[in-house]
Amino acid sequence: MSCIAVIDFETTGLSPAMGDRATEVAIVLVEHGQVVDRFQSLMNAGRYIPSFIESLTGISNAMVAAAPAAEKVMAEANRFVGNAPMVAHNASFDRRFWEAELNRAGEKATQPFACTMLVARRLYPQAPSHKLGVLIDYHRLPKAGRAHRAMADAEMAASLLGQIQDDLRSRHRVTRPDHALLLALQRCAKPAVSALMSKYAGA
């Protein structure tokens, strides 16, 4: 099974289209269900962090002022990921910042994104919520430090990814629960999940 890059951003707000910027990025590389490498950095994008965001993340304006320039961090992050396909929880959020920050750095974002939140909605409709922390508790997976810090959230998303892949093997008899299957699952209408699993069973 190929390596997958699990990513999480902390940011000044919800949307790069509204002028928000990344303040921290963390990426864990997962291979055969194991974390094999990590990348994490604060970044200085020259954007003020609102007080409520600082309270949420613990990342202050002083911390990012001392951090490397966002363009430098993103170029390093892109080299770290390489051609590995990517995963994030609520991936539409992280993908927007990945693409926007790489574009500012003069880099191309070519990696496909799968979303553990969308996949979890298909596989675990009975879960009380599909927020990352709730799913971690639901599956009794270990917490990985302070929530809303990039590395802790990336580590927990990687743990959830491992749980998803294990369940695809044990419950649905999918021998290779790879990134392509995650993409197919997240695009699949909920009533069609069983048929999709039957298609991939034994594959």
Image: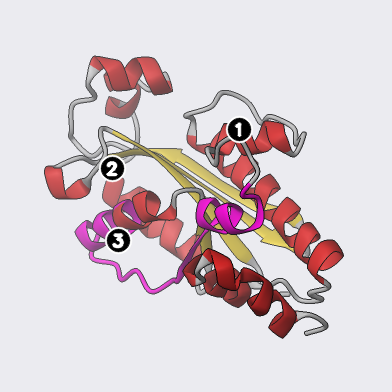
On the image, the x and y values in percent for residue 49 come to 24, 24
- The amino acid pointed to by label 2 is Ala
Above or below 9: residue 79: below
Please give the name of the residue rendered at 59% of the width and 32% of the height, measured from the top-left corner. 133
- The colouring scheme, among rainbow, by chain, secondary structure or one colour, is secondary structure
Mark 1, secondary structure of its residue: helix
Image location (x, y in percent) of residue 130: 55, 42
Q: CA distance from mark 2 to mark 1?
A: 34 Å
* Mark closer to the chain start, 2 or 1: 2
Check disc 3 and report the residue beneath it.
Answer: 99
Q: Nearer the viewer, mark 1 or mark 3?
A: 1
Which quarter shows the C terminus? bottom right
Q: Which mark is in front, 2 or 1?
A: 1
The residue wearing badge 1 is 134
Are the residues tagged 2 and 1 within 8 Å (C-beta)?
A: no
User: What quarter of the picture does the N terminus occupy?
Assistant: bottom right
- Where residue 180 sits, quadrant-wise, is bottom right
Seen in the picture, residue 105 relative to 11 is either above or below; the reply is: below
**Disc 2: CA contacts within 10 A as few (<14), some (14-19) or many (>=20):** some
Secondary element at image label 3: helix
Mark positioned earlier in the residue sequence (1 or 3): 3
Q: Position of residue 128 (x, y in %)?
A: 60, 35
The residue carrying pointer 1 sits among few (fewer than 14), some (14 to 19) or many (20 or more) residues within 10 Å by Cα, namely: few
Q: Which residue was labeled with disc 2?
A: 69
The spot of residue 17 in percent (x, y) is 15, 50
Residue drawn 22% across and 21% down? 50
Task: Give the residue type at disc 1.
Answer: Val
